[in-house]
Amino acid sequence: MTKETVAGEIENGMAALGIEFGSTRIKAVLIDSQNNPVAQGGFTWENSLADGIWTYSLEEVHNGIVTAFAELKKDVQEKYGVKLCKLKALGISAMMHGYLAFDKDNKLLVPFRTWRNTITGKASKELTELFNYPCPERWSISHYYQAILNKEPHVPQVAFLTTLAGYAHFMLTGKKVLGTGDASGMFPIDAETGNYDKAMVEKFNKLSAEKGIAKDILSLLPQAIPAGTDAGRLTKEGALWLDPAGDLKDGILCAPPEGDAGTGMVATNAVAPRTGNISAGTSVFAMVVLEKALSKAYPGVIDIVTTPDGKPTAMVHVNTCTAEYNKWVELFAEAAKLLGADFNTGKLYDTILGSAAKGDKDCGGVYTVNYISGEGVTDFSEGRPMVIRSQDAKFNLANFMKSQIYSAVATLRLGMDVLFAENVKIDSMTGHGGFFKTEGVGLETMAAAMHTPISAMATAGEGGPWGMALLASYAADTKGKNLGDWLETEVFASAQKKTIKPDAEDTAGFDKWLEGYKVSLKAERTAVENIK
């Protein structure tokens, strides 16, 4: 499509927009009528630890989305010479789970508690036993029930619970709805009905009433709706909330707001049974669409969520992936600058991370535990990043960085071992996110760790925001197809992808290193107990 054609589509409101709130970046991606990315904008942010709670303020949320959209408008103007005023459709996605509780006047009652918090252990355990269904610590219902157990004073005032994507969607449309995939990280979804599980709702209502909170949980949760549904229209107030400059017109169709797991599935064409994807950035999670239910629940290790169109999906979620080795790369950059080096960020990452390719297959006796926060898979409520090396370790940059990169996927592998033991069939897995950007490192390491071929598509760098833009485009015109068929025929029919099969020596080296890593977790537990 020519630049002039794209400009005409943008002017005529034929483009679709996806905006995703990631852990460290808010990104807006605009796509044309052929679902290709044509412009983008972004905003970098970081969660803060306030009074023991990982959070972002609503002011940061608003400033971030306004800035990302303004950057998108600027990109459109510079590339195509037109002003972005109209859209075919738009959609919001964000980190899943967490706790945003509002009163009857839509006032936030307590600071946003993100997915990163591991402060709901008692609630998670009780609900998992009550439902006989995994109810992880980061899920919204675990946060709400923990607040009930803690007898927090705000609980009687709660009138609405939602996720970050649900909040932004409400600000844009006034609608209290949520895409099925994101909703499945708030409260368990019945795969048959595509709605909150009725039996579990009744069990929770009885339990909360016994604790003095006699509210129907359904009255507090957003309505769960599948991909392809009209989730409301952009209001005048919503348009100004997103674009204070006043250029964006109201009345735009809004797709169901989704979680980053769902948009990752869409962006990697992994919404059909026996397909899977791995999203690896600040955090990492693997999603595998199931053919049948697992034999039992695996609390803290395997979550059961859904695709945006409601198919049951096994999810292994790990809180930290690239965040710790990013800190080390920044440290090396600081040292290099003191020595007078001049380089760009891309070269820095490619060089430092790329050095791992020359490391020993088992990292030469160097072990890294990258836990910035707690990890449910290995039963840690807190983390202390640490590096350990044996007495005769080959301690050099290549082995150090290889250990860092191995550590980024080690806990994910421990969770995936459960699915492998369940004999879950996986025909294909596609990776996306920052972990896969460095040539010769990301795909190769993940394939070795997972014992499975891993693919990356040429569009994978766009990630979740592009996936959300696709969902917006799908909502505007499903063409009478289910989501999987629509993606296959309208988006990925001619997609280019690179596939790496696991190398036998790499796999053996990773497995050997992993045994040492498991032992290192004993030192990690001691560090958590003794270093504050």
Image: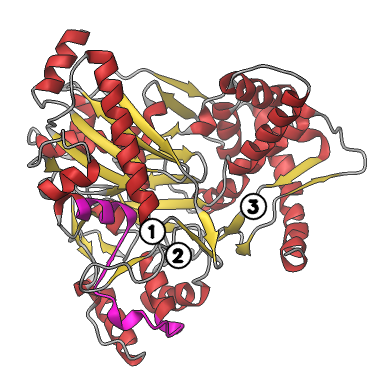
Q: Position of residue 509 (x, y in %)?
A: 72, 34
x then y, percent, for residue 400: 76, 34
Question: What secondary structure is found at the residue carrying circle 3?
Answer: loop
Residue 408 locus on image (x, y percent): 61, 42
> Is tag 1's residue or tag 3's residue first in the polypeptide sequence?
1
Q: Amino acid at mark 1?
A: His
Give the number of the mark in front: 2 or 3: 3
Q: Earlier in the sequence, mark 2 or mark 1?
A: 1
Are the residues flagged by discs 1 and 3 in contact, CB closer than 8 Å? no
* Horizontal and vertical percent position of residue 53: 51, 64
- Judged left or right of residue 220, residue 186 is right
Q: Residue at x 17, y 48 (%)?
A: 238
Q: Which residues are magenta?
A: 148-171
Callout 1: 10 Å neighbours few (<14), some, many (20+)? many
Which residue is identified by label 2? 136
Crowdedness of circle 2 by 10 Å Cα count: few (<14), some, many (20+)?
A: many
Q: Which mark is residue 146?
A: none
* First in residue order: circle 2 vs circle 3: 2
Q: Are marks 2 and 1 in contact (CB under 8 Å)?
A: yes
In the rendered structure, does residue 170 fall within the stretch colored magenta?
A: yes
* Extreme-right residue of the structure: 391
Read off the residue under disc 3: 371
Q: Which mark is residue 97?
A: 1
The kind of residue on which mark 3 rests is Tyr
Q: CA gap, disc 2 to disc 3?
A: 18 Å
Nearer the observer, 495 or 298: 495
- Could one spot residue 235 in this view of the protein? no
- The crowd level at tag 3 (other Cα within 10 Å; few <14, some 14-19, many 20+) is many
Q: Is residue 225 above or below residue 398?
A: below
Secondary structure at numbered mark 1: loop
